[in-house]
Image (cartoon, rainbow, N blue to C red):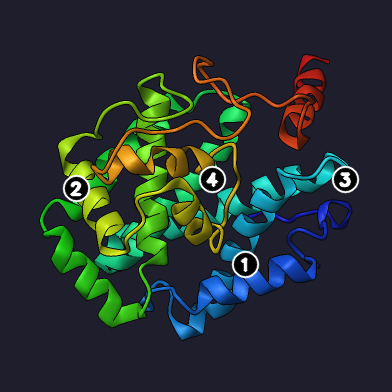
Amino acid sequence: MPYHMHEDFRTLYFYNPNETIVKATLDSLTKLPIGSVFSKQRAPRTKRLVQGIHGLAHAQTRFDIGWIAPWANIYDVSYLLAQLQLEVEQHGSLEERVVVIGCQMQFFGMMTVFVEQTDIQNHLLGRLEEAITSIDPSDLCERWLELTGSLDWLLWTFCNAGVSVLQLTGCHSLATEPLPNWLQLAVEYILQHLRLSQPDDLRARLQQMPYTEIWNGRACQSAPVWSNTGIATSPPGSRESSPSYTQPTPNKFERLRKYSDYWFAT
Protein backbone atom coordinates (compact mmCIF):
# COMPACT_ATOMS: atom_id res chain seq x y z
CA MET A 1 0.00 0.00 0.00
CA PRO A 2 1.16 3.61 -0.51
CA TYR A 3 2.99 5.17 2.37
CA HIS A 4 4.24 8.55 3.49
CA MET A 5 7.61 8.84 5.18
CA HIS A 6 7.49 11.45 7.95
CA GLU A 7 10.07 14.20 7.40
CA ASP A 8 11.85 13.28 10.64
CA PHE A 9 12.76 9.96 9.03
CA ARG A 10 13.94 11.44 5.72
CA THR A 11 17.59 10.93 6.43
CA LEU A 12 20.73 11.71 4.48
CA TYR A 13 21.04 8.15 3.19
CA PHE A 14 17.93 8.45 1.07
CA TYR A 15 17.04 12.09 0.59
CA ASN A 16 20.36 13.90 0.87
CA PRO A 17 23.17 11.33 0.52
CA ASN A 18 26.82 12.18 0.77
CA GLU A 19 29.14 12.47 -2.22
CA THR A 20 30.40 8.90 -1.92
CA ILE A 21 26.90 7.43 -2.21
CA VAL A 22 25.94 9.79 -5.05
CA LYS A 23 29.04 8.92 -7.09
CA ALA A 24 28.59 5.18 -6.54
CA THR A 25 24.91 5.44 -7.49
CA LEU A 26 25.58 7.29 -10.75
CA ASP A 27 28.26 4.79 -11.71
CA SER A 28 25.96 1.83 -11.02
CA LEU A 29 23.10 3.40 -12.98
CA THR A 30 25.19 3.54 -16.16
CA LYS A 31 25.55 -0.26 -16.06
CA LEU A 32 21.88 -1.13 -15.60
CA PRO A 33 19.99 -2.98 -18.34
CA ILE A 34 17.36 -0.54 -19.61
CA GLY A 35 13.91 -1.93 -20.39
CA SER A 36 10.28 -1.35 -19.54
CA VAL A 37 10.96 -1.46 -15.78
CA PHE A 38 14.25 0.49 -15.75
CA SER A 39 13.07 2.81 -18.51
CA LYS A 40 14.18 6.41 -18.97
CA GLN A 41 10.71 7.49 -17.90
CA ARG A 42 11.23 5.62 -14.63
CA ALA A 43 14.77 6.94 -14.08
CA PRO A 44 14.02 8.84 -10.82
CA ARG A 45 12.54 5.72 -9.22
CA THR A 46 15.44 3.58 -10.43
CA LYS A 47 17.90 6.07 -8.99
CA ARG A 48 16.08 6.01 -5.64
CA LEU A 49 16.39 2.24 -5.50
CA VAL A 50 20.09 2.09 -6.38
CA GLN A 51 20.89 5.02 -4.11
CA GLY A 52 18.93 3.40 -1.30
CA ILE A 53 20.83 0.12 -1.56
CA HIS A 54 24.17 1.93 -1.71
CA GLY A 55 23.12 3.97 1.32
CA LEU A 56 22.09 0.85 3.20
CA ALA A 57 25.44 -0.79 2.53
CA HIS A 58 27.25 2.40 3.51
CA ALA A 59 25.26 2.75 6.72
CA GLN A 60 26.26 -0.74 7.79
CA THR A 61 29.89 0.35 8.00
CA ARG A 62 29.19 3.39 10.15
CA PHE A 63 29.11 3.62 13.94
CA ASP A 64 28.74 7.38 14.30
CA ILE A 65 25.16 7.99 13.15
CA GLY A 66 21.77 7.63 14.78
CA TRP A 67 19.70 4.47 14.45
CA ILE A 68 16.93 6.30 12.55
CA ALA A 69 19.04 6.44 9.39
CA PRO A 70 19.05 2.73 8.52
CA TRP A 71 15.47 2.26 9.73
CA ALA A 72 14.07 4.77 7.25
CA ASN A 73 16.26 3.45 4.47
CA ILE A 74 15.19 -0.14 5.11
CA TYR A 75 11.55 0.89 4.81
CA ASP A 76 12.06 2.84 1.59
CA VAL A 77 14.13 0.21 -0.19
CA SER A 78 11.82 -2.65 0.75
CA TYR A 79 8.81 -0.73 -0.59
CA LEU A 80 10.52 -0.04 -3.91
CA LEU A 81 11.61 -3.66 -4.26
CA ALA A 82 8.05 -4.84 -3.71
CA GLN A 83 6.85 -2.53 -6.49
CA LEU A 84 9.57 -3.62 -8.89
CA GLN A 85 9.08 -7.34 -8.26
CA LEU A 86 5.47 -7.05 -9.38
CA GLU A 87 6.45 -5.16 -12.52
CA VAL A 88 9.30 -7.43 -13.61
CA GLU A 89 7.14 -10.50 -13.14
CA GLN A 90 4.46 -8.97 -15.36
CA HIS A 91 6.47 -7.44 -18.20
CA GLY A 92 10.15 -7.13 -17.33
CA SER A 93 13.02 -8.44 -19.43
CA LEU A 94 15.25 -11.31 -18.28
CA GLU A 95 18.01 -8.87 -17.41
CA GLU A 96 15.68 -6.66 -15.37
CA ARG A 97 14.34 -9.67 -13.47
CA VAL A 98 17.87 -10.76 -12.63
CA VAL A 99 18.81 -7.28 -11.36
CA VAL A 100 15.73 -7.00 -9.15
CA ILE A 101 16.40 -10.46 -7.68
CA GLY A 102 20.01 -9.42 -7.07
CA CYS A 103 18.85 -6.28 -5.24
CA GLN A 104 16.46 -8.34 -3.13
CA MET A 105 19.21 -10.81 -2.27
CA GLN A 106 21.51 -7.98 -1.20
CA PHE A 107 18.75 -6.29 0.81
CA PHE A 108 17.59 -9.39 2.68
CA GLY A 109 21.19 -10.56 3.01
CA MET A 110 22.05 -7.40 4.90
CA MET A 111 18.93 -7.92 7.02
CA THR A 112 20.18 -11.28 8.33
CA VAL A 113 21.74 -9.36 11.21
CA PHE A 114 18.14 -9.03 12.46
CA VAL A 115 16.94 -12.54 11.77
CA GLU A 116 17.73 -15.44 9.44
CA GLN A 117 15.90 -14.99 6.12
CA THR A 118 15.75 -18.69 5.20
CA ASP A 119 12.36 -18.73 3.48
CA ILE A 120 13.05 -15.54 1.53
CA GLN A 121 16.53 -16.66 0.47
CA ASN A 122 15.17 -20.01 -0.72
CA HIS A 123 12.44 -18.23 -2.67
CA LEU A 124 14.88 -15.80 -4.31
CA LEU A 125 17.26 -18.61 -5.27
CA GLY A 126 14.34 -20.43 -6.86
CA ARG A 127 13.36 -17.34 -8.85
CA LEU A 128 16.93 -16.83 -10.05
CA GLU A 129 17.23 -20.48 -11.03
CA GLU A 130 14.00 -20.24 -13.00
CA ALA A 131 15.24 -17.09 -14.74
CA ILE A 132 18.68 -18.25 -15.88
CA THR A 133 18.61 -22.03 -16.34
CA SER A 134 17.04 -21.75 -19.80
CA ILE A 135 20.06 -19.86 -21.14
CA ASP A 136 23.70 -20.89 -21.29
CA PRO A 137 25.97 -18.74 -19.06
CA SER A 138 28.12 -17.72 -22.03
CA ASP A 139 25.04 -16.61 -23.99
CA LEU A 140 23.70 -14.73 -20.97
CA CYS A 141 26.99 -12.88 -20.47
CA GLU A 142 27.25 -12.05 -24.17
CA ARG A 143 23.69 -10.80 -24.24
CA TRP A 144 24.27 -8.78 -21.05
CA LEU A 145 27.40 -7.14 -22.45
CA GLU A 146 25.62 -6.17 -25.67
CA LEU A 147 22.89 -4.51 -23.63
CA THR A 148 24.91 -2.82 -20.87
CA GLY A 149 28.61 -2.95 -21.74
CA SER A 150 29.36 -4.27 -18.23
CA LEU A 151 28.86 -7.52 -16.34
CA ASP A 152 28.96 -5.87 -12.91
CA TRP A 153 25.24 -6.23 -12.06
CA LEU A 154 25.19 -9.84 -13.24
CA LEU A 155 28.38 -10.70 -11.33
CA TRP A 156 27.06 -8.98 -8.20
CA THR A 157 23.76 -10.88 -8.42
CA PHE A 158 25.46 -14.25 -8.88
CA CYS A 159 27.74 -13.53 -5.90
CA ASN A 160 24.72 -12.54 -3.79
CA ALA A 161 23.15 -15.86 -4.74
CA GLY A 162 26.32 -17.70 -3.76
CA VAL A 163 26.39 -16.05 -0.34
CA SER A 164 22.71 -16.91 0.11
CA VAL A 165 23.63 -20.55 -0.46
CA LEU A 166 26.39 -20.26 2.15
CA GLN A 167 23.88 -18.79 4.58
CA LEU A 168 21.34 -21.54 3.98
CA THR A 169 23.87 -24.36 4.31
CA GLY A 170 25.22 -22.99 7.58
CA CYS A 171 28.62 -22.07 6.13
CA HIS A 172 28.45 -18.44 7.16
CA SER A 173 32.06 -17.52 6.42
CA LEU A 174 33.40 -19.20 3.28
CA ALA A 175 32.76 -21.87 0.73
CA THR A 176 34.24 -25.34 1.14
CA GLU A 177 32.57 -26.94 -1.87
CA PRO A 178 30.96 -25.91 -5.18
CA LEU A 179 27.55 -24.30 -5.39
CA PRO A 180 24.41 -26.09 -6.64
CA ASN A 181 25.09 -27.10 -10.23
CA TRP A 182 22.82 -24.52 -11.91
CA LEU A 183 24.47 -21.69 -9.97
CA GLN A 184 27.99 -23.12 -10.04
CA LEU A 185 27.99 -23.16 -13.83
CA ALA A 186 26.93 -19.51 -13.99
CA VAL A 187 29.27 -18.26 -11.25
CA GLU A 188 32.24 -20.26 -12.49
CA TYR A 189 31.80 -19.01 -16.04
CA ILE A 190 31.54 -15.31 -15.17
CA LEU A 191 34.47 -15.45 -12.73
CA GLN A 192 36.68 -17.16 -15.29
CA HIS A 193 35.48 -14.86 -18.06
CA LEU A 194 36.43 -11.81 -15.95
CA ARG A 195 39.58 -13.53 -14.59
CA LEU A 196 38.49 -13.08 -10.98
CA SER A 197 39.84 -16.15 -9.20
CA GLN A 198 41.38 -14.41 -6.17
CA PRO A 199 39.54 -12.72 -3.28
CA ASP A 200 41.16 -9.31 -3.73
CA ASP A 201 40.40 -9.24 -7.46
CA LEU A 202 36.73 -10.04 -6.89
CA ARG A 203 36.51 -7.60 -3.98
CA ALA A 204 37.84 -4.75 -6.13
CA ARG A 205 35.15 -5.48 -8.70
CA LEU A 206 32.26 -5.93 -6.25
CA GLN A 207 33.15 -2.77 -4.36
CA GLN A 208 32.00 -0.82 -7.41
CA MET A 209 28.51 -2.07 -6.52
CA PRO A 210 26.58 -1.88 -3.23
CA TYR A 211 29.03 -3.68 -0.96
CA THR A 212 29.39 -4.59 2.68
CA GLU A 213 32.12 -6.86 3.95
CA ILE A 214 29.90 -8.81 6.32
CA TRP A 215 27.78 -9.99 3.35
CA ASN A 216 29.60 -9.54 0.03
CA GLY A 217 32.99 -10.25 1.57
CA ARG A 218 32.04 -13.93 1.89
CA ALA A 219 31.79 -14.15 -1.88
CA CYS A 220 35.27 -12.67 -2.25
CA GLN A 221 36.82 -15.25 0.06
CA SER A 222 34.97 -18.02 -1.78
CA ALA A 223 36.19 -16.98 -5.23
CA PRO A 224 38.89 -19.71 -5.55
CA VAL A 225 36.31 -22.45 -4.90
CA TRP A 226 33.59 -20.94 -7.05
CA SER A 227 35.97 -20.29 -9.94
CA ASN A 228 37.27 -23.86 -9.60
CA THR A 229 40.85 -22.66 -9.26
CA GLY A 230 41.68 -23.42 -5.62
CA ILE A 231 40.39 -23.35 -2.05
CA ALA A 232 38.79 -20.52 -0.13
CA THR A 233 40.95 -18.46 2.21
CA SER A 234 39.97 -16.58 5.32
CA PRO A 235 40.46 -12.82 5.41
CA PRO A 236 43.50 -11.56 7.37
CA GLY A 237 43.03 -11.88 11.11
CA SER A 238 39.98 -14.12 10.89
CA ARG A 239 39.54 -17.56 12.44
CA GLU A 240 38.82 -20.23 9.88
CA SER A 241 37.01 -22.32 12.44
CA SER A 242 34.57 -19.55 13.27
CA PRO A 243 31.09 -20.40 11.97
CA SER A 244 30.15 -16.82 11.19
CA TYR A 245 31.48 -13.31 10.84
CA THR A 246 31.33 -11.29 14.06
CA GLN A 247 31.92 -7.65 14.81
CA PRO A 248 33.70 -6.47 17.96
CA THR A 249 30.97 -3.91 18.66
CA PRO A 250 27.29 -3.75 17.64
CA ASN A 251 26.75 -2.16 14.23
CA LYS A 252 23.87 0.09 13.20
CA PHE A 253 21.53 -2.75 12.35
CA GLU A 254 22.14 -4.60 15.61
CA ARG A 255 21.43 -1.46 17.59
CA LEU A 256 18.33 -0.82 15.49
CA ARG A 257 17.12 -4.34 16.25
CA LYS A 258 17.46 -3.68 19.96
CA TYR A 259 15.47 -0.46 19.67
CA SER A 260 12.69 -2.09 17.62
CA ASP A 261 12.48 -5.09 19.97
CA TYR A 262 12.09 -2.73 22.88
CA TRP A 263 9.36 -0.74 21.14
CA PHE A 264 7.40 -3.84 20.14
CA ALA A 265 7.70 -5.29 23.64
CA THR A 266 6.34 -2.13 25.23
Q: Residues within 10 Å of mark 1 (few under 14, many from 20)?
A: some
* Label 2 to label 4: alpha-carbon separation: 20 Å
Measuring from the top left, give residue 109's x and y in whole percent: 51, 38
Q: Nearer the viewer, mark 1 or mark 3?
A: 3
Q: Which of marks 1 and 4 is in front?
A: 4
Residue depicted at x 62% and y 28% = 113
- Looking at the image, is 166 positioned above or below residue 192? above
Residue at the disc numbered 4: 107
- CB contact under 8 Å: marks 2 and 4: no
> Element type at marker 1?
helix
- CB contact under 8 Å: marks 1 and 4: no
Q: Which amino acid does label 3 sit on?
A: Ile
Left/right of residue 127 with respect to residue 11 in the rendered view? left
Residue at the disc numbered 1: 48
- CB contact under 8 Å: marks 2 and 3: no
* Label 2 to label 3: alpha-carbon separation: 40 Å
Whichever of callouts 1 and 4 sits on the residue coming sooner in the sequence is: 1
Whichever of callouts 1 and 3 sits on the residue coming sooner in the sequence is: 1
Residue 65 is tagged as: 3
* Label 4 to label 3: alpha-carbon separation: 20 Å
Q: How crowded is mark 3: few (under 14 residues within 10 Å), some or many (20 or more)?
A: few
Residue at the disc numbered 2: 130
Q: Residues within 10 Å of mark 2 (few under 14, many from 20)?
A: few
> Element type at marker 4?
helix
Residue 213 is tagged as: none
* Label 1 to label 3: alpha-carbon separation: 21 Å
* Label 1 to label 2: alpha-carbon separation: 27 Å
Q: 242 and 69: which one is in front?
A: 242
Q: Nearer the viewer, mark 2 or mark 3?
A: 3
Q: Is residue 58 visible?
A: yes
The image quadrant where one finds the C terminus is top right
- Looking at the image, is 58 positioned above or below residue 30? above
